[in-house]
Amino acid sequence: MKLLDRRAKPAQAARPRLGGDITQAPAPATAKAETAAPVQERWSHGSHLLTRAMSWGLMAALLSGPVAIGLYVFDDGAPVVAQEKAEVTHDSVARRSVASEQAAAWVQAWLTTPEDRAAELKTWWSGPLDLPKVAGQATDVRVVDAVPTAPGVWAVTVAASVTPAKGQPTTRRHYLVPVQVDGGAGDASAAVKAIPAIVQAPATAKTPSSPYNVTLPSDSPVVQSTQAFMSAYLAGDGDVARYTTPGSPLHAVSEAPLYEEAEVVSVRASERVDNVGSGQTPTDGQIVQALVDVTLVDPGPGEASTRKRSASWPLTLTARDGRWEITAIDGTFQTTAESSSAASSTTSPKE
């Protein structure tokens, strides 16, 4: 009869659960085992912290969007270097200024100098140069852009109203001039690197629709207040302070009236508002932002109808003591041109 030999199995180390919890402590059979458990427990706890950190990091990446997820998942541990932006300094401002001035002067001289005075252009350009026998005129010469394109080099765009010598109509033209600039604030110097090159005009931005889409009725107290203010502000009819909010810096544009008449044509609010109808009393502190279209009559002889011009003012009005007062001329409006949908409909405010 054989006896079954049951040999004692060595004690198995406890297997850590997710998060580092230990199901069973290992038997302290040897000193090695006694030291292994704390090490394993420390590793398990570290794994738990790492798991939580990764979870929070992934959650933050999800909330931050696809780009953040890509950076989180594919990051190889290399340090992220922020792209350095061009710093505006006294030196850079000085370089831009001298480059702009040099380019504008060069374009002005190049456009208005005839062939028999070509030597005068040696100040800017010593190379070969063809010029017309009769030069045209250049007015309203302005720098519209100046961009650094290389170390010490600026590309300057200059606009000018050019009238050719043979009576052609005046046109607005744009020229590109590369300018070399040395030094900085206090000692900057510039020299043109080429003859002006005519280029296309900068792109024109699309005119946004007007935010003022609620037309107020002509008998609205808001319209009446703006009419009184405009008459005093531009035509000297009354005291401006009577129609403005206390503390407002607004006063008459000049001591002598600038216009013979200032007639309010329409008032459009930026949103529907209460208490702006005829006979209604506004609540103190109520605010209306409106665009006021005005027809101005220039002083002078002849019929007034031949001296009219249109103008617009974006105004902020505030209600006080049952009436509307002009608080400020609001410079935040975008355009006075209405979108086609807004222009085709007139909406009355809530009565």
Image (tube, rainbow, N blue to C red):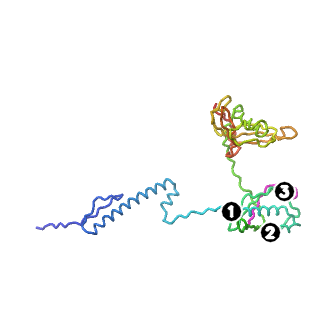
Which region is colored magenta?
A: 164-179
Q: Tell me which residue sits at (31%, 59%) in the image.
A: 22
Q: Tell me which residue sits at (15%, 66%) in the image.
A: 4
Q: Is residue 301 visible?
A: yes
Task: Please tell me whether residue 205 is drawn above or below residue 94 in the rendered image.
Answer: above
Residue 75, x across and y down, in percent: 49, 63
Residue 335, x across and y down, in percent: 70, 45
Residue 186, x across and y down, in percent: 72, 65
Q: Which mark is residue 163?
A: 3
| Front residue of 233 and 43 | 233
Marks 2 & 1, CB-CB < 8 Å contact: no
Determine if the magenta segment contains residue 180. no
Secondary structure, mark 1, is helix
Answer with mark 3 or mark 2, whichever residue precedes in sequence: 2
Residue at the far top: name it: 279
Q: Looking at numbered disc 1 in the image, what kind of residue is underneath it? A: His
Residue identifier under label 2: 125
Answer with mark 2 or mark 1, whichever residue precedes in sequence: 1
Answer with mark 1 or mark 3, whichever residue precedes in sequence: 1
Q: For the residues carrying marks 3 and 2, which lies nearer the camera in this image?
A: 2
